[in-house]
Amino acid sequence: MNPPSDAALPNMAPPVDLESKPFWDATAEQKLLLKRCDDCGSTIWYPRMVCPECHSTNTSWFEASGRGTVYTYTVSHRGRGPWGRVGPYVIAYVQLEEGPRMMTNIVDCDPETVECGMAVEVVFHDTGEDSAIPRFRPT
Amino acid sequence: MTIRDKAFVAGIYEHPRREIPDRTVPQIHAEVALGAVADAGLTLNDVDAYLCAGDAPGFGPLSMADYLGLDCRYIDSTEIGGSSYVAHVGHAAAAIAAGKCEVALITLAGKPRTPERGGGGGRGGGGGGAPEASYEGLWGIPGAVGGYALCATRHMYEFGTTSEQLAQIKVAASQHAQHNPDALFPYTVTVEEVLESPMICSPLHRLDCCVVTDGGGALVVVSPEVARDLGRTQAKVLGHGEAPKHAMNGKLDLTHTGAVWSGPKAFEEAGVSNGDIDYASIYDSFTITVLETIEDLGFCEKGKGGSFVMDGALVAPDGVLPFNTDGGGLCNNHPANRGGITKVIEAVRQLRGQANAPVQVPDCHIALVHGTGGSLGTRSGAATLILGREDA
């Protein structure tokens, strides 16, 4: 995994519940975890107890490669709260190598250069509360 | 028709525990859902209707159908406290009797004895213990516009749709709004004015967005016997379809809406086709909402919405598909940030011949109404209604 990068965006701690805790605990170690269904083999996103494909509850965590491509994006010019102070920023869905499309931010580049299909990799921005925000940057 | 003999309670499951500190509310919903379908000898893949009440977290049935991976064609979230689930059985039976669904799942879950910090249910779309909240609330989405902008970018990428084409939708709505003295924005705008308005979330400008308004609306639906005695032109319900569209286990396709499922059901029940529609109320939270919906309802081929809306296709009374003749959410009214009821109201006005005179569709016989709720960028509700004059 990549080292942490400087973050200009707000690094608010995520709402963590019993079900999402393993995901967020792993981010503190620079790991992006996904779930897989042990019965039908589907990759599960977002992570949950029951496989949304076959409804098995036999699911397990695994580490994603952290690589993907931009499925779609928007440059937001009107952030709210702390987002209103960071200038235009990119919200995107990244299609991970493992298949799922994950909502995130694209960072470490000029927002106007982001395109659908662009190759990206994960970076982690520390929240200061035992978790890190998984964002993506161009490779 | 009554519900007598039309429906059976085939599966039941009561969670065996009384303190569940190690589960979230969505997980408890999942456990009881799996228990009840197993008791019935079915699986969740057999379920085609889902009913829940205010204890379902996040966006209620949208969040929970997503979490559970349900393919639904009927949803109900009647919230009347502890009596909700009894009413749900009656509503499910009525839906089954009407052929709307075959297998309805009703769930209840909560944990007031061992509440989680930040959890515990409550509506709100992404907050309040929603299972998706851990993964969607961190990216600075500035309200609904962000999710719809993600759809617009992808639609442009796949189909070459342009900002000028989206702007045509606002222009058409504004041409209708100028005749509505109650409209918040009763002025015509040009394509250039839309494109020159401030960018909010690319590629959507301020004028690609609907208005924000206080207000409301109401409807009364009656039996044929009551309608007959009221002595006025009535709008008859011909058909209906509905579907949640969820994030599809990470495989979401942002170039279409749930109208691809709700539309065909409504057309089939009504026994009409696209060519029969004289007027359409199309939910218009943003210009892209209209474009994708027109394609999904079959008024043009997928990806061709941009060229379809050019040349005044949406402008009443002479366009190919006159739409939102009150000015729509884009220019007139979007009360409580929920525009579905005003869509029905304008369609009824058209069928009664009571629309504003310059935009009244001549001999308006059959009208379509389509509502979109939630966010097209994540999970959304779709509902299509087809109405007709009494002789339709």
Image: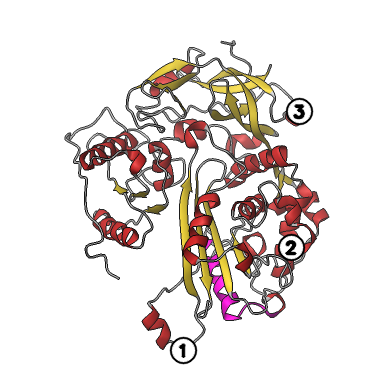
- B19 versus A133 height, above or below: below
Horizontally, residue B263 falls left or right of residue B186, namely left
Quick one: SS at disc 1? loop
Q: Earlier in the sequence, mark 2 or mark 1?
A: 1
Q: Nearer the viewer, residue B155 or B57?
A: B155
Amino acid type, residue under disc 2 in the picture? Ala
Q: Quadrant of the N terminus of chain B?
A: bottom left
Which disc, if any, is residue A113?
3
| Secondary structure under the numbered disc 3 in the rendered image | helix
Same subunit: marks 2 and 1: yes
Name the residue nearer the viewer: A99 or B333: A99
Instruction: From the top left corner, tell me how far across and down residue B280 is, in percent.
Output: 61, 65
Q: Are marks 1 and 3 on the same chain?
A: no
Distance, label 2 to label 1, CA atoms, is 35 Å
Q: Quadrant of residue B312?
A: bottom right
Q: State the image coordinates of residue B130 (x, y, percent, origin top left).
A: 41, 38
Which kind of residue does numbered mark 3 sit on? Thr
Main SS of the magenta part reads: helix
- The residue indicated by pointer 2 is B313
Q: Which residues are magenta?
A: B340-357
Q: In the rendered view, tell whether residue B198 sits above or below residue A67.
A: below
* Disc 3 crowd, CA 10 A, few/some/many (<14, 14-19, 20+): few
